[in-house]
Image: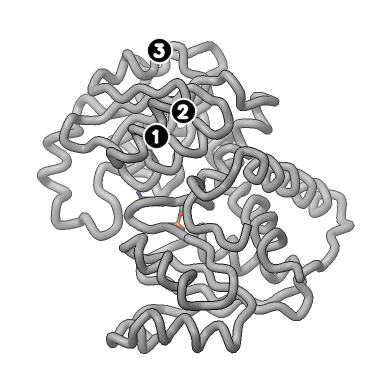
Amino acid sequence: MKHLLKLGDLTPQEITDILNLADQLKYEKAHGFASQPLKGKTLGMIFQKSSTRTRVSFEVGMYELGGYALFLSNRDLQIGRGEPVQDTARVLSRYLDGIMIRTFEQKEVEDLAKYGSIPIINGLTDYAHPCQVLADLMTIREHKKTLKGLKLCFIGDGNNMANSLIVGGIKMGMKVAIACPDNYQPDAEIMKWARENGDFTCTSDVMEAAKGADAIYTDVWASMGQEGEAAERRKAFEGVYQVNDEVMAVANAGCMVMHCLPAHRGEEITDSVFEAHANEIFDEAENRLHAQKAVLVKLMKG
Ligand code: CP
Ligand code: NVA
């Protein structure tokens, strides 16, 4: 594994290895004997979109591993004024040991990897959010003790989260069911791959997708960059694509509720369901730190 551009590039064994190392790093931190395998290493973090969790967990993660992280905002970098990604990649490769990038187009992340000579980590694109899903899988495994055979249901927009959950879930032997409006389905190629490689369904019927679920996941109706479509999207999702008590009633007993955050209470999830499952949702947020530390060690430890 040279980069983390999307989960489709990883084998099930590589995902399992990351989850195992993440569990170990979490245990070591809790017991006060953490080592510093990235001493002297630097990670550049390019942000073309806002972030709370990704920025803080990567920065703290590098610090805890003995390394250093630089926050590089698009507003300040020359890339924001049009310097080609091919040149940025080659320049930054001379200074840094790794780059985490959050941007719009998946191609930009792939190009950084193509032209640079250091590990590249996708910190969210319009297409994928692999770091989030590694933390999600870690959290489900932590709570349920297994992944294989569990039903993962995603309710909402067929966005970057849906795409990465489908790939991560299917690779780990989960059943994946998506409920979304017909015009807001996940990536067509990802869905084709999922149907050919596992137990995958996509429906507009929320109850059908949620029935017998072991984990129900949701995300905002309008992602970063889609603010202009918010009103139109609200019409397509409101009143139907929401995790609420009625939806939870058809899931399995002990069904987890997950959200990558930030959440819009009263839209994709009710306040009462969110608060009843806050423990799972904030374990999930915490696990971003541990899962990403595992990724950083796998990619950047000499
Ligand atoms: N879930 C997630 O990636 O959060 P941020 O946008 O705050 O980084
Ligand atoms: N789908 C959301 C995820 C945020 C972590 C977005 O892209 O804005």
Count of number-bearing discs:
3
Residue 9, horizontal then vertical, whole percent: 52, 50
**Label 1 near ligand 2 (CB < 8 Å):** no
Instruction: Assess whether mark 2 and mark 1 are in contact (beta carbons under 8 angstroms).
Output: yes
Q: Quadrant of the C terminus?
A: bottom right
The secondary structure type at the circle numbered 3 is loop
Q: Which residue lies at the image location 26% right of the left edge and 30% below the top edge?
A: 180
Q: Which residue is mark 2?
A: 197
Between 267 and 27, the residue placed more toward the observer is 27
The secondary structure type at the circle numbered 1 is helix
Q: Quadrant of the N terminus?
A: bottom right
Q: Is residue 215 above or below residue 231?
A: above
Local crowd size for mark 3, using a 10 Å CA cut-off: few (<14), some (14–19), many (≥20): some
The secondary structure type at the circle numbered 2 is helix
Residue 161, horizontal then vertical, whole percent: 40, 44
Of mark 3 and mark 2, the one earlier in the sequence is: 2
Q: Which residue is mark 1?
A: 193
> What amino acid does circle 2 point to?
Asn
> What amino acid does circle 3 point to?
Lys
Q: Which residue lies at the image location 70% right of the left edge and 59% below the top edge?
A: 298
Visible residue check, residue 158 = no
Q: Which residue lies at the image location 31% right of the left edge and 44% below the top edge?
A: 159
Between 95 and 115, the residue placed more toward the observer is 115
> What amino acid does circle 1 point to?
Trp
Local crowd size for mark 1, using a 10 Å CA cut-off: few (<14), some (14–19), many (≥20): some
